[in-house]
Amino acid sequence: MVIPSYMNYISKYIQHNIIEFMNQMINKIYPLGNKASLKANNVYLNPVISNINNNFKPLYYANFLKSLDGRIATYDKKNDRLLTPSSIKNKIDFILFCQLHAQADCLVTNTHYINGLNKGYYGDILSLNDSYLDQWRDKNKIKQQKIIILSNSLSFPIDKKIEKYKERITILTTSNNKKKLSTLKNNGYTVISYAGKNISENQLNNYVIKNKFKSVYFIAGPTIVEQMISKNLLDRLYLSTSISMVGTENYDSIIRGNFLKKSIKLELIEMYMYTKIENKEKEQTLFQVFNLKRK
């Protein structure tokens, strides 16, 4: 499983040169309107996602960064795993990721990410140290984020990197390992057990509805996102495309085809282009927002 986009470099850059890049301009190319250019600091803050559904149903959304040839991750020899290629990352994409993060009252992640956080090849994105976004959340009355960890195996360590989030974490699991379950519960974690081999999209959806979450952001890999798409549960997909080709044979993509067995239509809602010229070389990233909900 591969974690999308940002996780292996977020900690290093979360407070570095952010203000400078927040003031960068992004060109809006669809739909056309009065404002052709927007500052990066509020592109994904309008509308407030938790207010989109008026029927108390949660709005599920995910975000991926990919190359033009569809790679969200390629083999990293140093870490011996698939990671986001450094060549497609940029700070504007990270800023927009943070805005989507700020919109959420619930984050969904998994065992793979927690292990990567522990081992150091993923950064900590379970919270944001951003006063601008904190103020925006307070102004829009978005409640404190809860964190759902999907874990069929419970094979992750309990350490200080997740201990500080203990009060916000709920673990959904199908594991029947009594020792692991007991250890987590004795350490103060909320653990909910389900029957079956894997946590399903319907089990997750039922838990989210029961707890009245309104804006649920997937910061895990593509597996659960594909499951949500296949069951018509994912509402929005935010897609960042680096206008570059990465190549390589060992890579991962958004859809693997394990769950989605037929083609579906997406509705393009918004599209933006960011262009940066450095050392006479042009770097471009396309940002698209899609509606996935089918009637």
Image (cartoon, helix red, strand yellow):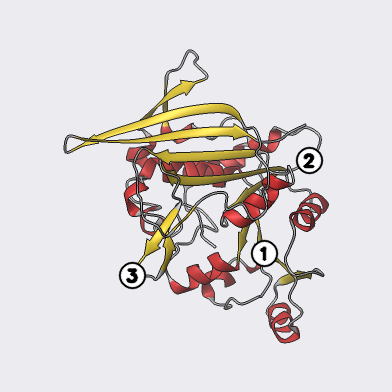
Numbered badge on residue 184: none
Please provide percent x and percent y for residue 232. 73, 42
Residue labelled with disc 3 = 78
Sequence-wise first label, 2 or 3: 2
Position of residue 118 relative to residue 53, above or below, is below
Numbered badge on residue 150: 1
Q: Is residue 18 left or right of residue 141?
A: left
Residue labelled with disc 2 = 57
Work out how far the residue at label 1 is from the one at label 3, CA to CA, in angstroms: 27 Å
* Callout 1 secondary element: strand
User: Residue 157 versus residue 151: which sits nearer the camera?
Assistant: 151
Quadrant occupied by the C terminus: top right
What's the amino acid at mark 2?
Lys
What's the amino acid at mark 1?
Leu
* Callout 3 secondary element: loop
What's the amino acid at mark 3?
Lys
Sequence-wise first label, 2 or 1: 2
